[in-house]
Amino acid sequence: MKVIPIAFESMGVRSMATYVETDQKILIDPGTSIAPKRFGYPPWKNEFDALYETRARIGEYGKIADIITISHYHHDHYTPFEPGKFLDSSLKFAEKLYRDKKLFIKHPTSQINKSQQKRAKVFLKNLNGLNCQINYADSNSFEMGDTSIKFSNPLSHGGEGSRLGYVVALTIQWDGKKLMHASDIQGPISNEAKLTILDEKPDMLILSGPPIYLQGFAIERTEIENARRNLIEISGKIPEVVVDHHLLRDLKCFDFINSVKEESRGKIMVASQIIGKEPYLLEARRKEFYRASKY
């Protein structure tokens, strides 16, 4: 099984876009974005470079892929047809990306919040005429050639009862190996998400870490600590854990990761390290870039 990270915070953008190759060619969560504001500053120029580069990589792997999966309708997890804040020409790009693909997507009306439901409706309307095979992913399993793809029940986007809605985690099984990709479960904070992961027993898990940069005003310290305990348990039982996304929006992320490693003795890395690259944190360093430019 070939696993290639395309866009993650450890590669300079907000994303969890991943390409997986078995006897099928699978593109997971093909979206990329950057924060409009952090520390009171707009994006620095190298963030724009990373955004355009990762968008191009999504397009290249989109040409190869037969299957595209979408865990939920946030712009860092799928490419909409309408232009984003920093990306133009979304219509033509999205048409090329989705045309003739088998799509496995979060259900557009069930266990979904209002804003994502609205986005999903527009998304499905724009897929008309693109010869897509559309499948609703939630709680369903599919056999594609020798590859099994399985989607979880809808899981909270973060803690239980999150206003950000629900996501579906994906498990790919092929040739005796099992990969699980769990977008935006943020830790996992939710014990339900933890149990879902442990029940699957993947050989490799790719998940979003907790948003420690929001601690104290959008998320409680107790939730971060629960995420840490859950990740310790997970990384003690799963051979390879890749933690990225929300966690890497704060430079203290590596203190968090090291504390989990020390207690679990597990193998934990960030997404860029899968392909032998050092983490390239940009959003977390935005203040640093602006301050350095003054001297």
Image (spheres, rainbow, N blue to C red):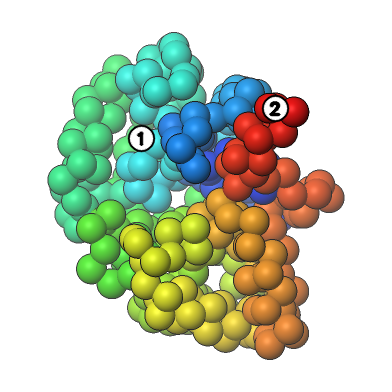
Mark 2 is surrounded, within 10 Å at the Cα level, by few (under 14), some (14 to 19) or many (20 or more) other residues, namely few
Residue matched to label 2: 293
Q: Amino acid at mark 1?
A: Gln
- Percent coordinates x, y for residue 139 in the rendering: 32, 63
> Residue 261 in the image: x percent, y percent?
71, 79
- Decide: is 266 above or below 40: below
Q: Would you say residue 172 is visible in this rendering?
A: no
- Picture residue at 48% right of the left edge, 80% below the top: 225
Residue 21 x %, y %: 66, 46
Q: Residue at x 65, y 79 (%)?
A: 260
**Nearer to me, 151 or 242:** 242
- Residue 261 showing in the rendered view: yes
Secondary structure under tag 1 reads: strand
Residue at x 39%, y 23% (from the top left corner): 84
Of residue 214 and residue 101, the one placed in the foreground of this image is: 214
Q: Which residue is mark 1?
A: 133
Q: Residue furthest front?
A: 295
Quadrant of the drawing holding the C terminus: top right
Q: Can you give x and y, in whole percent of width and height, for residue 192 in the image?
A: 36, 78
Q: Earlier in the sequence, mark 1 or mark 2?
A: 1
Left or right, residue 181 beside residue 54: left
Report whether 156 appears left or right of 146: left
Q: On screen, 141 above or below 76?
A: below
Please tell me how crowded label 1 is: few (under 14), some (14-19), or many (20+) other residues with Cα within 10 Å: some
Q: Is residue 279 above or below residue 240?
A: above
Q: How many marks?
A: 2
Quarter occupied by residue 122: top left
Q: Of the residues tagged 1 and 2, which is closer to the observer?
A: 2
